[in-house]
Amino acid sequence: MAKIKIAPSILSADFSKMGEEVKSLETCGADVVHCDVMDGVFVNNITFGIKMVEDLRKITSLPLDCHLMIVHPEKYVERFAKAGADMITVHWEACQDNLKEVLELIKSTGVKCGAVINPDTPVEKIKDVIPMCDMVLVMSVFPGFGGQKFIPEALDKLRQVKAIISACGKEIDLEIDGGVTEENVQAIKDAGANVIVAGSTVFKATDRAGIIQKLKN
């Protein structure tokens, strides 16, 4: 069984004190920092970009998981890699037929790569590229905003992706993002996810270390 990793999304952090927020994740036992990069075109929200990743790299040793919710991600891959991303994930919906090439580009920068699908995209669309990924991300909400309700159909997708990962015999992380809570996290893990993105669940908690531990266990 792959180690469970908790990857709080800084989309839910207080942007006016991002450095402190990320430091608090370190002390509270988070395993990964999930960076939701949104361009206002691919999704209906704008967050932050390369400079944020570059500045976070200076203050944390935690892996930076950069989830690019942007059009033409291939234009920015090298810059995110240079800024200090450890993992770059890109959407099938943004790349489509070009996805394999974009994943190869990410790999060529020495950074881990991942493919992402939205709730209404079938697993079939990324089946062929899963063996070349370091991680697959299944969205359990429509991307754009934090604090949304979990879409239960995502569990079936996790099981489908997990079966493909098992069949190809490689160690590939399976990540879930959107609406994760204490109540549904066990079902998510049972369906095969081992990297759990949690934004508001972690950042709104009075005891962040406690909630991270609960999500893990």
Image (spheres, rainbow, N blue to C red):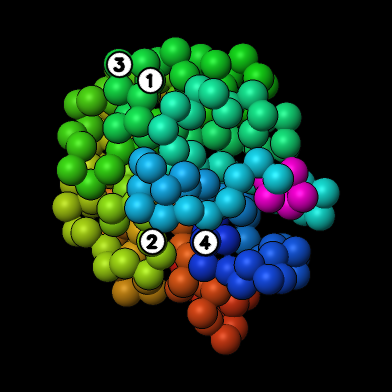
**Principal secondary structure, stretch drawn in magenta:** helix
The alpha-carbon separation of the residues under discs 2 and 1 comes to 24 Å
Q: Which of marks 4 and 3 is nearer the N terminus?
A: 4
Q: What residue type is labelled 2?
A: Phe
Provide the residue span drawn in magenta: 52-56
- Secondary structure beneath disc 4? helix
Q: Residue beneath label 4, please?
A: 11
The alpha-carbon separation of the residues under discs 1 and 4 comes to 25 Å
Q: Which of marks 3 and 2 is nearer the N terminus?
A: 3
Q: Are marks 2 and 1 in contact (CB under 8 Å)?
A: no
Q: Earlier in the sequence, mark 1 or mark 4?
A: 4
Q: Do the residues labelled 1 and 3 touch (CB within 8 Å)?
A: yes
Answer yes or no: is residue 33 visible: yes
Q: Residue beneath label 2, please?
A: 145
The residue positioned farthest toward the right in the image shown: 58
* Image mark for residue 191: none
From what the image shows, is residue 127 above or below residue 70?
Answer: above
